[in-house]
Image (cartoon, helix red, strand yellow):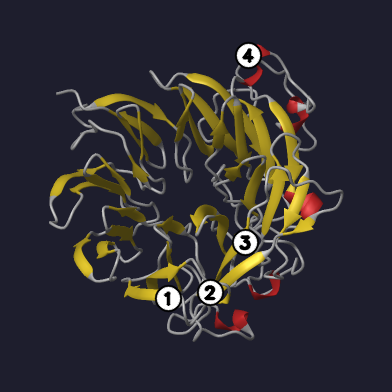
Amino acid sequence: MVSDEKGLPDSFDPVTGKNILWRVPLGSETHSTPVVAGGRVFIGTNNERPRDPRRNGDRGVLLCLDERDGRLLWQLLVPKVTNSIYWDWPRAGICSPPTVESNRVYLVSNRGEILCLDIDGLANGNDGPFTDEARHATPVGETPAELGPFDADILWSFDMIRECGIRQHDSAHASILLRGRFLYVNTSNGVDDSHKVIKSPDAPSLVVVNKKTGRLVACDGEHIGPDIFHCTWSSPSCGMVNGRPLIFFCGGNGVVYAFEVLHDDFAADTVATLKKVWQFDFDPAAPKENIHSYLTNRRESPVNMLDMPVFDRGRIYVSGGGDLWWGKHEAWTKCIDAGGTGDVTRAAERWLYPLTRHGISTASVADGLVYVADCGGKIHCIEAETGKPVWTHETKGDFWASTLVADGKVFIGSRRGEFLILAAGREKKILCDVELGEPVSATPVAANGVLYVATMKTLYAVKATN
């Protein structure tokens, strides 16, 4: 959520075209943050604007676009899970952002698959070991269309639903953490259609796979499943604590965990269990039994965390509270000391900052300040050391996106379609407030002097021209 990019625009206007380098229509719903790598822009969306007339209907889509002009290079099409709408929410598309390393693209699809893709698509041939892309892109019962150079090239696939017994809810959302030889992935395990039962209580919440082969090598052993209030949508992060790298993970049970990483020389014939270093109960006062009896209780409920834990200078910054759809309104951003062991719930909390309502956004930590937005329509600037408020800015829309801090500015868009550019720092200053006319779920991204802003239906490449 913090970038070293410089020369980014302090304003733009889609109506007049000011500072708009290019724009590309997406589907009708886009919840995935764009990712820029290797001269390409990747973004997940749905298939409401089909690029291939032979492949219509509700599917998840990953677009690979040319960074220079937004031209389509290739696309991945993934049929929907049809067990029920609560496995793969209608028209939600692919919600996960990809992770790119060299010529490999790693992604969690709407079907709960961890996929490894060739960055060039099928334009340079169909590389294995996976070679049945035509069938993969086709719903059951339909005849596969012939593949072409504008199709994705899948190198390997790991199906978390089939292999790990995951019961994903609404859709899979995971930003894959890549460290060394391994991918760390949250599984999106959650409640069933009734929202009151965990059908896969023994399924893992965090898995580790080999990035070259897609083989499962490790899982968490915390038995989080029975205590998941809604779903496991928070992605893992990594940081160096006292010379030791740790994986940080927010479970669907309202607990933040730290695990030891797998070293590159790790090898085992069986699936290992990640070694826990510490755990932190985000809300010790929240109900711990019969948790699903608190559905729709806006005053008292268990905790859900959707943001990624942010590590900075030996501390973790994470937001959580009542679930947006099912739980209490109360929510906080907390600062946690990352250096402990065991149950650190009492000892590790450095400060607590109350949010207006529900926290979904991941925090940005830069120059001693924490920037975080909430579903009450507020952007908060907080002292990283003390947790004291510096300033707030109130808008009319709630925030699902996260703040991006870059080039002395703070960028964020709201679900109401308002996009804000503020000056970073202790003095609140609004540089730009533009109406995009479409809700924003995606976090803005900066790369090579260009700001990328995705609404539900449009991707903008924004570049300062004066």
- The residue singled out by tag 1 in the image is 349
Separation of residues labelled 4 and 3 (CA atoms): 40 Å
List x then y, in percent, for residue 324.
45, 67
Mark 4 or mark 3: which comes first in sequence? 4
Separation of residues labelled 2 and 4 (CA atoms): 48 Å
> Residue 280, labelled with which disc?
2
User: Viewer-nearest of labels 4 and 3?
Assistant: 3
List x then y, in percent, for residue 67.
42, 22
> On the rendered structure, is 163 left or right of 400?
right
Give above or below for 202 relative to 53: below
Badge 3 local density, few (<14 within 10 Å), some, or many (20+)? some
**Residue type (three-letter) at the residue carrying disc 2:** Phe
Residue at image coords 63%, 86%: 289
> On the rendered structure, is 423 left or right of 45?
left
Separation of residues labelled 2 and 1 (CA atoms): 9 Å
> Residue 421, labelled with which disc?
none
